[in-house]
Image (tube, rainbow, N blue to C red):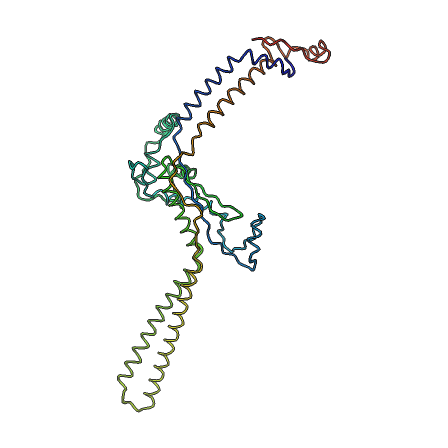
Amino acid sequence: MYEFDLITLLRTLKAKRKRIFINCGIAAVAAIVIGFSIPKQYSSSVSLAPEMQEEGNLGGMSSLASIAGVNLNNSSDAIGPDLYPDVVSSNAFLVDLLDTQVETADGSVKTTFMQYLLRHNKRPWWGLAVGGIQKAVKSLFKKDKPNWSKQKIDPQRLTPEEEGLITRLRGIVSCSVDDNSGIISISVSAQDPLVAKTIVDTATAHLQLFITQYRTNKARNDLAYYQQLEQEAKVDYAEAQRNYAAYSDTHQDAALQSYLVKQESLENELQLAYNNYSKIRQQVQMAQAKVQEKTPAFTVVEKANVPNLPSSPRKKLIFIAFLFLAFAGTVLWIYTRLLWPKGINLSSAPSDAPLAASGGKAPIPHAQS
């Protein structure tokens, strides 16, 4: 068979149906074994909408443009919503999640998230085999075991083992932002449903705290500066009060003009100190109001819940994929055997001989079972 012949191919597949069934059966058994060997994963997610700070006089044009898929947000923030996924996947953010106290749904495990990942996570049998080989190879070159008992992981100076744990954590915690609506979605996958829900709540709280601190950073710095000025002005005002009171008490009956001028000077200094203190107090109150104004409000669109059904592995999809690959592979192998049957040396046979003998078409051999 040197060219495609559907009838011959169908006859050959019918004759070879036993081989097809055997291969599909083997693939089905392999799919069942692999599907039940992969540990179950539960996913929990949360969606929240932060308050968007826009500058300019766009008014309702931004909302109308978002419907058409155009982003007219003129926010002056250096870290906008499009960078929130990078924040969530950063080392510092993920290291903070490792200290979270978690508990499994059955209550059998109560520990930190890091210890849960290291000691209480299941792996498939081939993962255990590969992990054992890797440990054996590493033990030949490195005899120091990773120290996971230290109090804090430095996100700026990770060991190879810690870097591997953080890389693994990036596949567990994910964040995405809708460009049109600005909805932030955070998802966590874990082998226990309650652990997944706990971590997604913690990640959401940490992201909200990060956004709040970033948005209010300048306002909080201004507030701290005005509060320092307020303390200094209060000290100056108290000092002016003491000087004026002490001088007035010791010169109550004084009639000399020099005494009266000195008393008037101290009174003016007291008034100036009071005016300065009062003005700075107003600045402090305005700075406090500015901090409150810059603090974003978060609206939780969808709260995280404890999932009842696992999100992976998808056993039906694995089963169908294995059956398809086995069937397609067997058909392709049979078709290849028809194109180049055994006993024909394509390199030594003349290229024009088959075509000349068949009037320009290649001969079609009969299918053999």
At 34% across and 40% down in the image, what residue appears?
113
Residue 290 quadrant: bottom left
The percent position of residue 224, horizontal first and vertical second, equals 38, 62
Q: How many marks?
A: 0
Residue 286 to residue 11: above or below: below
Percent across and percent down for residue 172 are 41, 38
Q: Quadrant of residue 99?
A: top left
Residue name at image x 50 percent, y 53 percent: 78
| Nearer to the camera, 51 or 253 | 51
Can you give x and y, in whole percent of width and height, for residue 58 in the image? 57, 58
Q: Quadrant of the C terminus?
A: top right
Pick whichever, 269 or 169, lies toward us.
169
Q: Is residue 143 left or right of residue 21?
A: left
* Residue 26 locus on image (x, y percent): 45, 18
Residue 314 against residue 235 in the figure, above or below: above
**Looking at the figure, which quarter contains the N terminus?**
top right
The residue at the far left in this view is: 250
